[in-house]
Amino acid sequence: MVINKSEAIKDRVNIQDNYKAGIFFIVTASLCFALIAVLVKQVRHLPLMEIILFRNIPTMLIIPLMIEKSKIPFLGNNKLILLFRSFIGAIAMMLMFYTFKVMFLTDAITIHNLSPFFTFLLAGIFLQEKLSLRQLPFFIFAFLGGLLVIKPGLRLDILPALIALVAAMGIAVTHVNLRHLRLTDHYLVIVNYFSYISGVVSLIILLVQKSFQLPSLSDCLVLILLGGIGLLAQIALTKAYQLAPASLVSLYTYSQIIFVSVFGLLFFKEIPDIFSIIGANFIIISGYLNYRYRSNN
């Protein structure tokens, strides 16, 4: 990952963090992402790239108007990191949406929520946020939780679970980049880059595959809702990482597990097995212990 440490430190003293606002925005984003998982599952019969394209269309239409109204340069300042973050984010989105289509939602979201631990490590390396060896047990605990959900050797659908794990790594990279970009670029520019990169890439793949399917009226309503909630999710996520440290904010993404567990049960009658339930609890508990450690130190 290409991040200039001296540049990341530059003017940091002038950036005022707002922890409470950051937590509010990340919980809002987590709720939105849980709803996105439900909506993707609802239209899983449609091609993956078509779903991703519709997810980005509202953002591609609305955000440029907001940028123009705010008199912000469209191309931003830190173009290399903006492009890097957008491409990694687009790949992570494709992997995430795939797992939503083929896995239990709770399993997919739980594995995705290993991303805060990757975020924490990357934030310490590239953003110089404080790391401590005393937090190593928390990472091991979370890793064990992830293994219980993935269940290597015990499940036939191991490939989707591994794809979900790669998606978690991609999410962590994008989140660290979001925190870095707060020093150089407006959140609307960051969201705009991501939506256009992921939207254009999905459109190209869709055209090459010639797999577009005309959605039904009910599918259209779901896709429109998906795009609207996706826009809100990206704005809330970007604001969260601009307002508070990545290693703190990322911990609150665990609320996704709770949200999606309820939604999966309500909408799809999905009941996770005992291994997934224990694994999810391991990950949530380790995140809480990590947060408590940071709060006391």
Image (tube, rainbow, N blue to C red):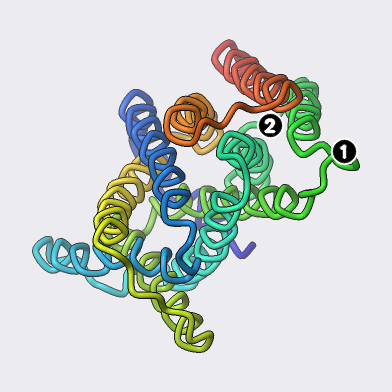
Say few, some or many: other residues with alpha carbon within 10 Å of mark 1 (under 14 / 14 to 19 / 20 or more). few
Disc marking residue 290? none
At 25% across and 73% down in the image, what residue appears? 74
Q: Name, please, the residue furthest toward the left.
A: 69
Q: The C terminus appears in which quarter of the rendering? A: top right
Per the image, label 2 sits on a secondary structure element best described as loop
The residue labelled by disc 2 is 131
At 70% across and 53% down in the image, what residue appears? 160
Question: Compared to 285, does 107 lie above or below?
Answer: below
Rendering coords of residue 188 (x, y %): 27, 58
Residue 160 visible in the current orientation: yes
Which residue is more in the foreground, 274 or 74?
274
Mark before the other along the chain sequence, 1 or 2: 2
Rendering coords of residue 250 (x, y %): 52, 35
* The quarter of the displayed image where residue 189 is located: bottom left
- At label 1, the amino acid type is Leu
- At label 2, the amino acid type is Leu
Rendering coords of residue 260 (x, y %): 48, 32
Question: Along the horizontal axis of the image, is 68 left or right of 148?
Answer: left
Judged by depth in the image, the label closer to the viewer, 1 or 2, is 1
| Total numbered badges shown on the rendered structure | 2
Q: Name, please, the residue furthest toward the right.
A: 153
At 36% across and 33% down in the image, what residue appears? 17
Which residue is more in the foreground, 27 or 295?
27
* The quarter of the displayed image where residue 72 is located: bottom left
Which residue is more in the foreground, 234 or 104?
104
Question: Along the horizontal axis of the image, is 178 left or right of 77?
Answer: right
At 72% across and 19% down in the image, what residue appears? 278
Rendering coords of residue 182 (x, y %): 38, 51
Per the image, label 1 sits on a secondary structure element best described as loop
The residue labelled by disc 1 is 154
Question: Compared to 229, does 84 lie above or below?
Answer: below
